[in-house]
Amino acid sequence: MSEKKDIKISAAKGRPMLSWVGKRPLRHVTAFPAQHIETFAPVEKCKASETSESWNDWPAAYTKGGLLFHGENKEVLAHLLANGFRGKVKLIYIDPPFDSGADYVRKVQLRGGAATAKIDGESYALGEQIQYTDIWANDNYLQFMYERLQLLKELLTEDGSIYLHCDQKKKHHLRCLMDEVFGQSNFKNEIVRIKCNPKNFERPAYGNIHDAVLFYGKSDDNIWNEQVEKADSEDMERLFAKTTENGRRFTTVALHASGTRNGPTGKPWRGIFPPPGRHWAYVPAELDRFDAEGKIEWSSTGNPRLINFADEKGNNRVQDVWTMKDPTYATYPTEKNEELIGRIINASSNPNDLILDCFIGSGTTASVAQKLGRRWIGCDINKGAIQTTAKRLQGIIEEQVKETVQKTLLTTKEFSPEPAQLSFDVWRVNDYDLKIQRNEAVKLACEHIGVERVASEGYFDGKLDKKMAKIIPFEHPLSPLDLEELKRELEARPDVENTIVFVCLGIELSARTWIEDWNRLRKSEHTVNKIEVIELRTDAKYGNFIKHDPATAKVSITREGDQIKVRIEDFISPTILKRLDMDMPLFKAKITDWRSQVDCVMIDTAYNEKVFNVTFSDVPEKKNDLIEGLYILPAPADTTTVAVKIIDMLGEEVLVVEKG
């Protein structure tokens, strides 16, 4: 996985076909290599224990277990196609951005007592951390989804299914995209999910309390496991409106069905013919049995109807309206209910099948798949999402390991489904490992320079006076590739005549030449689309913007016989200090326990300086719990390298490595 590959994508041929400015069918995509970052396998033998036949065609480059990718999902999906996963995913669930014009944030606060303590009337809250920005131009949003749907189709098995979660604003557009990519004939359902109480009381319209899930198969032969749910009392009264003399609720249904038959069901029963164009739904012997059991209601005109009693129908077949609200106290934006995902996974996959979610967010899909004995792949461009998902899965797998041991000891089957794997690996496609998250960096840069964010924009990040501003990702300098992307955008949007301002940390020499040639053709005063550059490292007015003081930790790592002792003695995050608007002395005086800044700790007692294998993890169960800070672990027999990874409450990582 060390080289780039060009992957061909089959054309979408479904109808109808939606059109938008700048529509570009995806014919091929470049697949970048991935770097193995981290492994979690709480019991070493578990990592190699995935021996079921479902793993036989698993790509050799990956160990058998869950896969969590940090990267832009288009690049991750291309990477999966290039590395053996084409046509192997049984079920896809995605909850993509809804084009809502909102910044999605998660609440961040310190751990322990500091989470609720007060300083001058303010809590130790670190505020809101942007997880991703859902601000698009309509055309860009459609292109974004179109490309990813085409890639996802390539990954599905022929009997696979895809569920796309969306809201009322984009549902009609996404339905057209799904028809085009997967084919109108493969549409199965539009599921209406009741999500909340109405919130738009002041708007002159009906309150919106639902969103939608679009369900498509790749073919007619999609996996389907019938789902049932217990009928509530209100349903029972509505569906079984009649009562017998002793109060037993019932309803009646027709005993005939559409279509004519030449056999016994097409002939008269007890002298009664079925209505024209219909036949009896049961053979005469079955009809006689129903009548003998008192399950046929005869009308005054002699028309028979089958009686269904409520007490014999405790469960209903699940229909396309679901009442499943999101978690009440979700800490991650757009976090979904596990029951919702569980129903989808149970209905459209079987144990050991492979599940994919390329907008993994807080990790609900992977978590439920792990609990239900499915294999899984998840990815997200946001590092906070990867960290949140990894922590969540570590807790689930550790519980499953304990349950597996208990199950062996008690020899009982009264446990949750057998796990498909008891380990997972974290990979990175391209380098999105910023010291500060991309969306937060964009926000800070806009505030520093004075860029006004425009909610309706997709490509540009906002306006600087009358100029359109575009902030280049801070992990790479402004390059000719960025400029060519701008050129394509302007060709698709001839109405944009503003000067363009690129904001970047650096600029390639070839990009400077490109801009000089571009502007040379635009020397007159009224020429449109001139290009300017603000280089944040060197600009006289805006320079010295990015000055990141990394978090630091004081860690003691010692070897005592056959044990390794790790003691975290201190930790400080300048970013957290800035968020609290406190200097170091005040922080130390008011918040005496440094552990309040730390979200979790992971240790690798045999670090190979390439992949971090989680030998031990300290992930506090509750928000107010603190990490331990002192860890005594078994030592490898030979000289080893110990690595300690500390993640603070804002997601910044500190890695301390020491040989011992």
Image (spheres, helix red, strand yellow):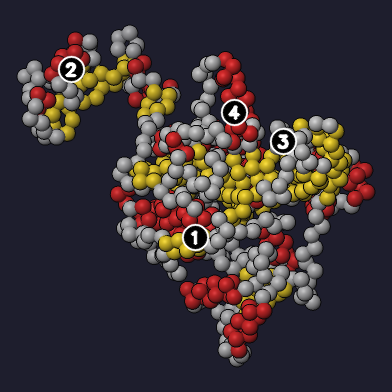
* Residue at 53% in and 58% down: 75
Nearest the viewer among 451 and 80 is: 80
For marks 4 and 2, give the one nearer the viewer: 4
Residue, x 63% and y 83% (percent of image)?
Answer: 513
Mark toward the start of the polypeptide (4 vs 1)? 1
Which quadrant does the C terminus fall into? Answer: top right
* Sequence-first disc among 4 and 2: 2
Q: Could you give the CA–CA distance between mark 2 and mark 1, rounded to whole angstroms?
A: 56 Å
What separation in Å lies between label 1 and label 3 (alpha carbons)? Answer: 39 Å
Q: Secondary structure at mark 1?
A: helix
Identify the amino acid type marked 2.
Answer: Glu
Which amino acid does the dot numbered 1 rest on? Phe
Label 4 – label 1 distance at C-alpha? 37 Å
Residue at 50 percent across and 27 percent down: it is 417
Image coordinates of residue 152 in percent, x first then y, are: 44, 52
Which of 521/454 is in front? 521
Could you say whether the residue bearing mark 4 is in a helix, strand or loop? helix
Q: Quadrant of residue 225?
A: top left
Comparing marks 2 and 3, which lies closer to the viewer? 3
Residue shown at 70% from the left, 60% from the top: 441
Q: Which mark is residue 616?
A: 3
Q: Which residue is mark 1?
A: 144
Q: Which residue is mark 2?
A: 286
Residue 289: x %, y % from top left: 19, 13
Circle 1 or circle 3, nearest the eye:
3
Q: Label 4 sits on what residue type?
A: Gln
Q: In the displayed structure, does residue 654 sit left or right of residue 322?
A: right
Mark 4 crowdedness (10 Å alpha carbons): few <14, some 14-19, many ≥20: many
Q: Which residue is mark 4?
A: 400
User: Along the polypeptide, which appears first: circle 2 or circle 3?
Assistant: 2
Structural distance between the alpha carbons of marks 2 and 3: 64 Å
For the residues labelled 4 and 3, say whether their Cβ atoms are less than 8 Å apart. Answer: no
